[in-house]
Amino acid sequence: MKISARSILCTVVFMLVAAPVFAQNSGPSATGSFEFSSGGHPLVISFDARTKTNGSTTGQVVLTGSAAIPDQDVDGEGSSGGTSIVTVALNIAVDCLKVSGKAAAMSGEITDSNIPAYIGHRALLAVVDNGEGVKAPALDQFMWGIYGTPNLTWVPSDAELTFDPGVGLTWLATDFERNDDVGIPSHPSTTVDCQTFSTEAYSFQDLPHGGGNIQVRP
């Protein structure tokens, strides 16, 4: 049975509207819905992510539309025979939200998709709220990506030592002269989340007027 992007989108909209309202006593939030084009193919992203007063994050990001998918698995393994234009539907359970001024980054695991190879991967959505309407000082912006988790099968050690005492040790490198330095871990996580990149590192794309609405609340 062929499922159209329109029918999937209608289902998604119903899910977002029918979903229970998040707890009123919440902290920073990022909500919205917008359309964009990737490789000439239309896509829609709807999102609602919030940080509760207890520090936990809840929400979801839904992507629907059509896209050119390589004829191989999403990690780039296997043989490629070109691309296919397919209907795509992804649901991401948000577990991380970072709000910095008018910008927000949210991430989570893809928990459901009509393309099974994407399930279990991490997704990241970053947005910038530059105001409402045609009189806004600038256009809203966004950045979107899907990431795998590297499977490290080797352990770094000193080749000149039969037994390297440093293997397995972890540490935090900090500036001794600054008490506010959070430090850099010796073994950083390979899992992409909302804290992985700084806001300045994102390559944002402008959202044209009428393409949707993005709202970020500190």
Image (tube, rainbow, N blue to C red):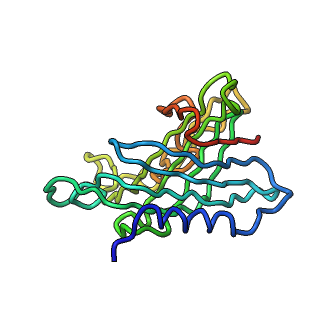
Q: Is residue 61 above or below residue 104?
A: below
Left or right: 174 in relation to 25 = left
Q: Position of residue 194 (x, y in %)?
A: 58, 47
| Residue occupying image coordinates x 64% and y 42% | 213
Q: Is residue 76 above or below residue 174?
A: below
Give the residue at the far bottom of this rendering. Answer: 1
Q: Which quadrant of the structure image shows residue 200?
A: top right
| Residue occupying image coordinates x 81% and y 55% | 26
Left or right: 154 in relation to 99 = left
Total numbered badges shown on the rendered structure:
0
| Residue occupying image coordinates x 62% and y 68% | 15
Q: Position of residue 65 (x, y in %)?
A: 42, 56
Left or right: 144 in relation to 164 = right
Q: Which quadrant of the structure image shows residue 214?
A: top right
| Residue occupying image coordinates x 69% and y 36% | 100
Q: Is residue 136 above or below residue 183?
A: above
Q: Locate the C terminus and report the quarter of the image it occupies.
A: top right
> As rendered, which of 160 and 188 lies closer to the eye?
188
Give the residue at the far right of this rendering. Answer: 25
Give the residue at the far top of this rendering. Answer: 137
Q: Position of residue 54 (x, y in %)?
A: 80, 59
> As rendered, which of 153 and 8 lies closer to the eye?
8
> As rendered, which of 48 and 162 lies closer to the eye?
48
Q: Is residue 91 above or below residue 125?
A: below
Left or right: 29 in relation to 96 = right
Q: Locate the N terminus and report the quarter of the image it occupies.
A: bottom left
